[in-house]
């Protein structure tokens, strides 16, 4: 079978994860080209991944006739323009979230994608492809917990990364903690409850790292969503988990519930010593969602080969941004915001 030839733009931490998966873990894909404005990243692609074609100019890579699809892992502000360039060049497109940084750009990009119905477009909400979340979804669809009516989600980054995040200058440009951190959990809420929220109320606090407050944001925040069908969502996002990268989701239904990752275990090993019984925790998102990134990219390639539509579409990206923006507004104003 002919392999799907892929060009990737952006080779930062997440970009390298996708590039390595395409090069070594996706049988139907061939990593043909890489684009970056950083020489060391292009050298990495050539020397470590065996990529023959490298580009400084994304538009030029899109015009390469030897490329069937483009994977976009560049800074978020570039996503709308790069999506449009790739589609116009006849390429299938995978884009990491967010779709865009403003709701207006999301809606415009959604309309742009609709112009190319014969080209596969997929957005990077990889948690849907995590084996545990995929299992939970199948159990819910089978009726195992009855009708789901509440999703409780936690997403907290490691405390060990907080000071470097503050030093980087990213926080004031992030759009706020909800825009920065809530989209994956909100996407899961929509996926599990099969509906969109109608209202949101949010509060935030800064306790351990006062520089988050000094930089115009908060260290942690909570939001409560009321969904159109009467279901509910509870969300906790933060930046100071002392034990590691903590992602947890509980879906409660009329006949039972499912919890995913109540303890973010590194593996199944348990250490018994003078401090007690200890399980090591995962330290970051590439480690926690390693298999999800592989399965997500495999789905993108399979959709191209099989000429079908992915389960995550461009509208999911618009809705995630819309709901995150409402949650951020609720956090900043202290009011209940209608979505």
Image (cartoon, grey):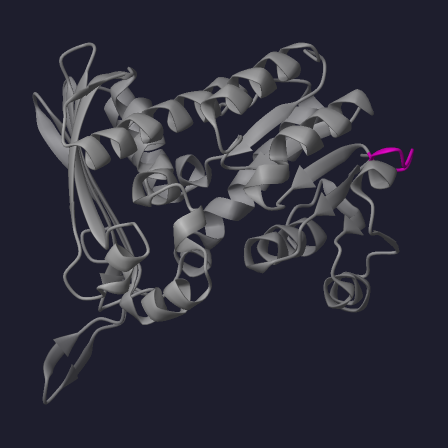
Is residue 165 positioned above or below 7 on the image? below
Q: How many marks can you see?
A: 0
Residue at 17% x, 75% y: name it. 278
State left or right for residue 85 relative to residue 169. Answer: right
**Image point 84% across, 41% down: which residue?**
61
Q: Can residue 199 be seen in this view?
A: yes
- Please name whichever residue, 210 or 182, is drawn nearer the observer in this view of the structure: 210
State which region is magenta.
Answer: 62-67
| Percent position of residue 287, x then y | 43, 60
Q: In this view, does 31 lie above or below 265?
A: above
Residue furthest out toward the right:
65
- The quadrant in which residue 235 appears is top left
Q: Where is residue 254 in the image (x, y as percent from the top left)?
A: 7, 20
**As displayed, is residue 195 above or below residue 173?**
above
Residue 118 shown in magenta: no
* Residue at 22% over, 68% down: 242
Q: Which residue is drawn at 83% across and 45% down?
A: 57
Quadrant location, the N terminus? top right
Can residue 145 be seen?
no
Q: Determine the image quadrant of residue 114.
A: top right
| Residue 253 in the figure: left or right of residue 193 | left
Compare residues 298 and 206 and report the one nearer the observer. 206
Q: In which quarter of the image is the C terminus?
A: top left
Determine which quarter of the picture holds residue 63: top right
Q: Where is residue 227 in the image (x, y as percent from the top left)?
A: 20, 16
- The secondary structure making up most of the magenta span is loop
Q: Position of residue 160 (x, y in %)?
A: 32, 71
Query: From the viewer's perspective, is residue 304 above or below residue 237?
Result: above
In the rendered structure, the answer to whether residue 290 lies left or right of residue 200 reads: right
Relative side of 54 to 313, left or right: right
């Amino acid at each position: 079978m002919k392999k799907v030839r892929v060009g990737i733009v952006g080779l930062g931490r997440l970009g390298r994860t996708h590039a390595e998966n395409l090069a070594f873990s996706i049988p139907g894909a061939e990593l043909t080209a890489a684009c970056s404005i950083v020489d060391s990243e292009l050298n990495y692609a050539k020397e470590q991944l065996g990529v023959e074609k490298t580009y400084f100019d994304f538009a030029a890579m899109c015009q390469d006739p030897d490329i069937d699809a483009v994977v976009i892992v560049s800074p978020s502000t570039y996503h709308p323009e790069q999506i449009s360039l790739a589609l116009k060049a006849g390429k299938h497109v995978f884009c990491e979230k967010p779709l865009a940084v403003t709701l207006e750009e999301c809606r415009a990009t959604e309309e742009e994608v609709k112009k190319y119905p014969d080209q596969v477009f997929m957005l990077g909400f990889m948690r849907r492809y995590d084996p545990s979340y995929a299992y939970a979804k199948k159990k819910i669809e089978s009726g195992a917990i009855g009708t789901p009516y509440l999703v409780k989600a936690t997403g907290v980054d490691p405390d060990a990364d907080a000071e470097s995040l503050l030093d980087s200058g990213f926080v004031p440009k992030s759009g706020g903690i909800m825009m920065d951190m809530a989209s994956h959990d909100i996407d899961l809420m929509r996926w599990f409850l099969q509906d969109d929220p109608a209202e949101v109320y949010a509060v935030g606090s800064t306790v351990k790292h006062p520089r988050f407050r000094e930089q115009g944001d908060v260290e942690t925040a909570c939001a409560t969503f009321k969904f159109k069908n009467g279901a509910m969502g509870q969300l906790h996002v933060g930046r100071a988990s002392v034990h590691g990268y903590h992602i947890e989701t509980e879906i409660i239904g009329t006949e039972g519930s499912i919890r995913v990752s109540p303890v973010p275990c590194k593996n199944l090993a348990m250490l018994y010593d003078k401090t007690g019984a200890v399980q090591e925790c995962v330290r970051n998102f590439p480690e926690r969602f390693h298999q999800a990134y592989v399965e997500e990219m495999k789905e993108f390639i399979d959709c191209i080969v099989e000429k079908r539509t992915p389960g995550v579409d461009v509208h999911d990206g618009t809705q995630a941004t819309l709901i995150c923006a409402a949650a951020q507004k609720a956090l900043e104003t202290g009011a209940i915001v209608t979505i």
